[in-house]
Image (cartoon, rainbow, N blue to C red):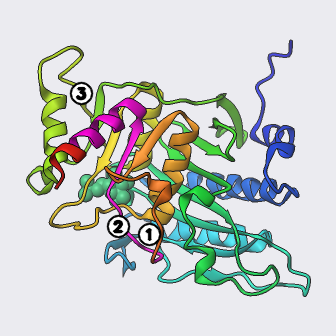
């Protein structure tokens, strides 16, 4: 049996037929994300050396200081997706509205839209802590060949055809799903190739790690407060370990490998939670469910939430199935 490790390119070709509605377009789309991830990785890895740190002086729609790498990553992903003429529309955390990729030729038949958080956790850039890119892919719902509309982006998470993230950590990994399980690919920076390093990734059903910003504890709903105290009690495998990196992709990735739960509840500073439904929560929820995990807002499944606006925020509880079930039990019992 060949002990040759499969590359991402070989994996995409081998699994081409399992892509729903596959016409090779989705494969080309994943390949373009692979290219952009390598380009962004190169800049992230040398951020400490090049004067690319520090706020770019602008603020994005979130009212947050835009780090220069945020701007760079946003431009690279948009550029790559646009130049390859693969998608008909893009929405980004860094863009106020969606971008319509109009046809270079009259028979423009692209049918996918991409929603992206180009550099999540960007506040960690200047302190050399891992950051990530998150992407979500849908088929458009408006007629092919016409300019995309907002409704092409405001689709429930359950309609996603693919989702994934890049984690720029001690190594750079691309982890994604097309609805047939979750696979992780590690970049060999020496040759710029992603290799299948984590086939069929799955959340352990239970875990002993919880990730939440406990600085907001006093503002949390009572159900979340009760769950955190439950994690801290002495009983069985508790107290659990608290691990919070401040980078969703990194906390999620560790929890998926070791077992754990990530929570960003609502609070006084974030009455609807902080994380964005369309390009943070839904893609991570799709991956979580494909990896035998679970994701909700504490009450209803994340991917069942009906979107109403592009940068909508929702409370987010995601990870090992039995841990999410326990949070939902406390939320039903104690509520807000
Ligand atoms: P806080 C990064 O800004 C992010 O969107 C997630 O990656 C991260 O988990 C969270 O926000 C950190 O937010 O309020 O705890 O600093």
**SS under mark 3:** strand
Residue 278 drawn at (x, y percent): 49, 65
Q: How many numbered marks appear?
A: 3
Residue shown at the point (48%, 68%) measured from the top left:
306
Q: Is residue 30 left or right of residue 99?
A: right
Q: Quadrant of residue 49?
A: bottom left
Does the CB distance between marks 2 and 1 fall below 8 Å? Answer: yes
What separation in Å lies between label 2 and label 1 (alpha carbons)?
Answer: 7 Å
Q: Which residues are magenta?
A: 309-330
| Mark nearer the viewer, 1 or 3 | 3
Residue 146 found in image quarter? bottom right
* Mark 1 Cβ and ligand 1 under 8 Å apart: no
Identify which residue is drawn at 70% across, 74% down: 141
**113 inside magenta stretch:** no
Mark 3 Cβ and ligand 1 under 8 Å apart = no
Residue 287 makes an appearance in the image: yes
Q: Earlier in the sequence, mark 3 or mark 2?
A: 2
C-alpha separation, residue under disc 1 versus residue under disc 3: 34 Å
* Percent of width and height locating residue 88: 73, 76
- The mark closer to the camera, 3 or 2, is 3
Q: Are marks 1 and 3 in contact (CB under 8 Å)?
A: no
Q: Which mark is residue 241?
A: 3
Q: Which residue is mark 1?
A: 68
Say few, some or many: other residues with alpha carbon within 10 Å of mark 1 (under 14 / 14 to 19 / 20 or more): many
Q: Name the residue carrying label 2.
A: 54
Point out the quarter of the image occupied by ligand 1.
bottom left
Q: Is residue 86 left or right of residue 293?
A: right
Q: Secondary structure at mark 1?
A: helix
Q: Quadrant of the N terminus?
A: top right
């Amino acid at each position: 049996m060949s002990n040759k490790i499969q590359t991402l390119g070989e994996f995409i070709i081998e699994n081409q037929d399992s892509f729903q509605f596959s016409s090779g377009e989705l494969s080309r789309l994943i390949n373009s994300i692979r290219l952009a991830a390598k380009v962004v990785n190169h800049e992230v890895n040398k951020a400490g050396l090049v004067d690319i740190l520090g706020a770019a002086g602008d603020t994005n729609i979130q009212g947050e200081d835009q780090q220069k790498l945020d701007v760079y990553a946003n431009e690279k992903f948009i550029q790559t997706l646009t130049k390859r003429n693969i998608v008909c529309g893009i929405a980004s955390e860094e863009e106020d509205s969606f971008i319509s990729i109009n046809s270079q030729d009259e028979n423009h038949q692209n049918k996918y839209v991409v929603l992206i958080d180009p550099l999540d956790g960007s506040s960690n850039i200047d302190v050399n802590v891992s950051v990530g890119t998150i992407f979500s892919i849908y088929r458009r719902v408006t007629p092919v060949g016409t300019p995309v509309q907002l409704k092409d982006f405001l689709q429930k998470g359950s309609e996603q055809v693919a989702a994934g993230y890049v984690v720029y950590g001690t190594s750079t990994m691309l982890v994604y799903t097309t609805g047939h399980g979750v696979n992780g690919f590690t970049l060999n920076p020496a040759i710029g190739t992603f290799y299948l390093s984590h086939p069929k990734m799955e959340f352990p059903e239970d875990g002993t790690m919880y990730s939440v910003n406990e600085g907001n504890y006093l503002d949390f709903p009572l159900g979340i407060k009760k769950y955190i105290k439950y994690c801290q009690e002495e009983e069985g495998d508790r107290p659990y370990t608290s691990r919070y990196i401040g980078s969703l992709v990194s906390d999620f990735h560790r929890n998926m490998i070791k077992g754990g739960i990530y929570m960003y509840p609502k609070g006084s500073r974030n009455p609807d939670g902080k994380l964005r439904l369309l390009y943070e929560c839904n893609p991570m929820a799709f991956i979580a469910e494909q990896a035998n995990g679970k994701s909700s807002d504490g009450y209803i499944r994340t991917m069942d939430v009906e979107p109403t606006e592009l940068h909508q925020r929702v409370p987010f509880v995601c990870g090992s199935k039995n841990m999410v079930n326990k949070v939902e039990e406390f939320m039903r019992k104690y509520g807000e």
